[in-house]
Image (tube, rainbow, N blue to C red):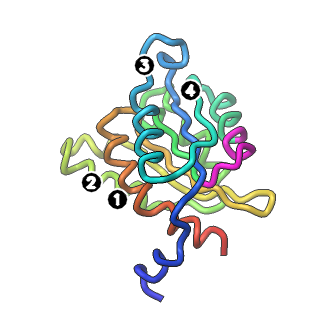
Amino acid sequence: MGVEEHKRKAPKRFKFAVVTVSDTASRGEKEDGSGRFLVEELEKAGHEKVYYTVVPDEKIAILGAVVEAFKAGADVLVTSGGTGVAPRDVTIESIRPLLDKELTGFGEVFRLMSYGEIGTAAMMSRATAGIIKSFGRAMAVFCLPGSLGAVKTGVKIVINEAGHVLKHAGE
């Protein structure tokens, strides 16, 4: 079965959660423009928001938000922030141990698209995706950088591929 046939059989709509990881936004010192943009774009694409929160760059806060997103029924979780190389960027380290399958190609595709926009600085992103399976269901997770530009790039991939990922994750 080819990719187009797989996509035809994939879910067209899903429930989603957005978690922004940002010390400053979690303290109310700045607006969460990236998280709001993700919610707006996913809703425009016909998907249903079931959870949204902003948490500090802290492992336990990130893990708690992932659990809450799963409990809320999210099929897809998109995080924004904490994917760089700074000491406080711990989103990947927090979420990676929960992944049953990691989609390494997501980060590669994201960085390729980003390279066209920001050049070699794209290598600084550790954007990651994967699948968490528990209680007989799967949740696709996409971890994006926190900048609005990165989120604009990443949400295109999420919208194009999340249903396809969910189809395979549920097999």
Q: Does the magenta stretch include residue 87?
A: no
Tell me which numbered mark, 1 or 3, is placed earlier along the sequence. Answer: 3
**Real-space Cα distance between discs 2 and 1?**
6 Å
Quarter of the picture holding the C terminus: bottom right
Residue 13 percent across, percent down from the top left: 54, 60
**Quadrant position of residue 126:** top left
Q: In this view, does 133 lie above or below 168?
A: above
Asked if the residue under mark 3 is in contact with the one under mark 4, i.e. CB atoms within 8 Å, the reply is: no
Residue 55 is left or right of residue 143, and the answer is right
Q: Label 3 crowding class (10 Å Cα cut-off): few <14, some 14-19, many 20+?
A: few
Q: Label 1 crowding class (10 Å Cα cut-off): few <14, some 14-19, many 20+?
A: some
Q: What residue is pinned by disc 4?
A: 54
Q: What residue is pinned by disc 2?
A: 113
Asked if the residue under mark 1 is in contact with the one under mark 2, i.e. CB atoms within 8 Å, the reply is: yes
Q: Which element is circle 1 on?
A: helix
**Real-space Cα distance between discs 1 and 3?**
28 Å
Q: What residue is pinned by disc 3?
A: 31
Closest to the camera, between mark 2 and mark 4, is: 4
Residue 66 percent across, percent down from the top left: 66, 41
Identify which amino acid the numbered label 1 is placed on: Val
Closest to the camera, between mark 4 and mark 1, is: 4
Q: Which element is circle 4 on?
A: strand
**Real-space Cα distance between discs 4 and 1?**
26 Å
**Quadrant position of residue 60:** top right
State the mark number for residue 109.
Answer: 1
Tell me which numbered mark, 4 or 1, is placed earlier along the sequence. Answer: 4
Q: Is residue 159 above or below residue 150?
A: below
